[in-house]
Amino acid sequence: MDILCLDLEGVLVPEVWQAVATETGIVELQKTTRDIPIYNDLMDYRLNILAQHDVTLSLISSEIAKLSPLPGAREFLDWARTEFQIAIVSDTFYEFAGPLMEMLGYPMLLCHKLTVESDRIVGYSIRQQDPKRKSVQAFKSLGYRVYAAGDSFNDLSMLDEADYGFFYCAPDNVVENYPQYPRTTSYQELKQQLMSC
């Protein structure tokens, strides 16, 4: 069976950090990899903001627990499971993702880990360098044909390495710079692209 690698935030669930920004009123947390493409730079920026405002992991977790998958996401995943093995390949953290994975039916999740002290996020551990590309390479080494969909700059290595890569609801500035990846704007469009390969 083929494997489908999906980004999480912006593809299946809302952007977690933006939701936290809205609930806490800390507008600086609105930035994502669409704004700061280098992930380590973005996370260092976020950790500084959290420290300045004394935001706890408990507060972030309580806000994440209020989120729901994007409309149609669970149904799309349920369909996709009938055609592919599914792997969520994300730059989120296990400490954030639990409630969201439950709502999505517990797909495989490959992501990162936070370092937490006294309920404060003080650091993070990246699974490996270029983890999205390496995940696709690993699946290909097992003989899978790999399909991938993402919405941002940090998904480009995954799309590049996959046999078939697609943008899902990506902003214009991302799509315009990388026109080689078909753009889809709904789960139905993505489903059609996947089935036409």
Image (spheres, grey):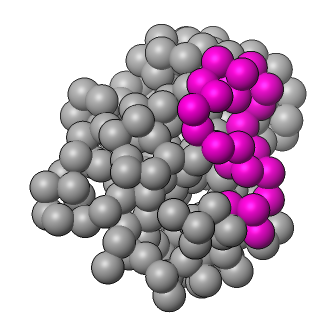
Q: Which residues are magenta?
A: 168-190
Q: Is residue 140 above or below residue 77?
A: above
- Left or right: 90 as drawn, with respect to 152: left
Tell which of 28 and 77 is nearer to you: 77
Q: Is residue 10 above or below residue 175?
A: below
- Left or right: 14 as drawn, with respect to 8: right
Tell which of 1 and 49 is nearer to you: 1
Q: Which residue is at a point 25% across and 65% down the rendered structure image?
A: 144
- Tell me residue 121's x, y (percent): 46, 31
* Residue 84, image quadrant: bottom left
- Indicate the quadrant containing the N terminus: top left, top right, bottom left or bottom right: bottom left
- Tell me residue 35's x, y (percent): 68, 16
Q: Which residue is at a point 64% across and 43% down the rendered structure image?
A: 182
Which residue is outermost to the bottom? Answer: 82
- Tell me residue 94's x, y (percent): 41, 53
The image shows a total of numbered marks equal to 0
Q: Is residue 139 above or below residue 135?
A: below
Tell which of 7 and 122 is nearer to you: 7
- Tell me residue 155's x, y (percent): 50, 36
The stretch drawn in magenta includes residue 180: yes
* Residue 67, image quadrant: bottom right
Whether residue 160 appears in this view of the structure is: yes
The stretch drawn in magenta includes residue 170: yes
Whether residue 15 appears in this view of the structure is: no
* Residue 15, image quadrant: top right
Which residue is outermost to the left? Answer: 141
Q: Which residue is at a point 58% across and 38% down the rendered structure image?
A: 181
